[in-house]
Image: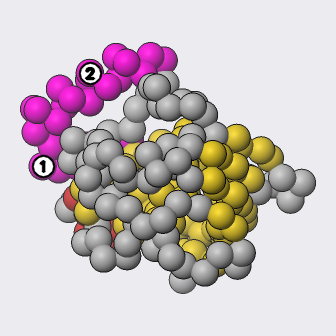
Amino acid sequence: MEWHGVPPASFRLLPNGGIGVQAEAQGSFVWRRVQGMPACLGWRWRVDQGPPPTDLTQRGGDDRAISISVGFSGWPPQVTMWQRTQHAMAQAAAGSHPLPRSVLTYVWGGTGREPVPFASPYLAGLGKVRVLRPAEAPRGRWFEESVNLAADWRHAFGGEPPPLQEIVISTDVDDTRSRLDARVEAIRFGPCR
């Protein structure tokens, strides 16, 4: 899927079931519906080429190599009427794709000095972002990740986490006009250890 006015990146299914992502001054995302209650999410990823460090806390210029977002079907406990209205407007623009009501995003990009977590500048307080690998992390090397979605949701929003709705893989390298070559594979939900 595309962001308005941004040329789409290239996502390809790899023989091992992973996803290859390539872009040049582009950005977009792919998503898949998921169900169930949040537990742990694991994956491995690598970036061979990507953007420089950017300030992910600000709109515009906030490029990142790759991110994995998990959408949830329920609102955070402290949701405001303004947030619900912003969500309704975004839903009207999104058409038939039901937007999640809360989102956790895990990023390869940024400076590594961002707060943990910080509010997405695009999701009206309904999305929280955590940098797992800063933009200057070693290139051409696989990194294994594991996150506890339930614990992260509680830390980000308070209260008990709602059911899962979707998982999204995205890239954004349009502002820095960067090239990207990255891969994500072995994405799996499972019990936390």
Q: Which mark is residue 16?
A: none
Q: Residue at x 59, y 61 (%)?
A: 50
- Number of marks in the image? 2
User: In the picture provided, is 139 more to the left or to the right than 166?
Assistant: right
Q: Quadrant of residue 152?
A: bottom left
Q: Is residue 190 above or below residue 79?
A: below
Question: How many angstroms separate mark 2 from mark 1 (CA)?
Answer: 19 Å
Q: Residue at x 60, y 81 (%)?
A: 138
Q: Position of residue 182 (x, y in %)?
A: 68, 60
User: In the picture provided, is 87 more to the left or to the right than 73?
Assistant: left
Q: Position of residue 37 (x, y in %)?
A: 46, 55
Question: In which quadrant is the C terminus drawn?
Answer: bottom right
Of the image marks 2 and 1, the number of the one nearer the N terminus = 1
Residue 177 seen anywhere in this rendered image of the structure:
yes
How many C-alpha atoms fall within 10 Å of the one at disc 2: few (<14), some, or many (≥20)?
Answer: few
Q: Is residue 90 above or below residue 27?
A: above
112 in magenta: no
Q: Which mark is residue 78?
A: 1
Q: Position of residue 20 (x, y in %)?
A: 74, 53
Who is closer to the viewer here, 123 or 53? Answer: 53
Residue 33 seen anywhere in this rendered image of the structure:
no
78 in magenta: yes
Question: In which quadrant is the N terminus drawn?
Answer: top right
Q: Is residue 104 above or below residue 93?
A: below
Observer-side mark, 2 or 1, equals 2
Q: Residue at x 57, y 40 (%)?
A: 26
Please provide the residue range marked out in magenta: 73-96
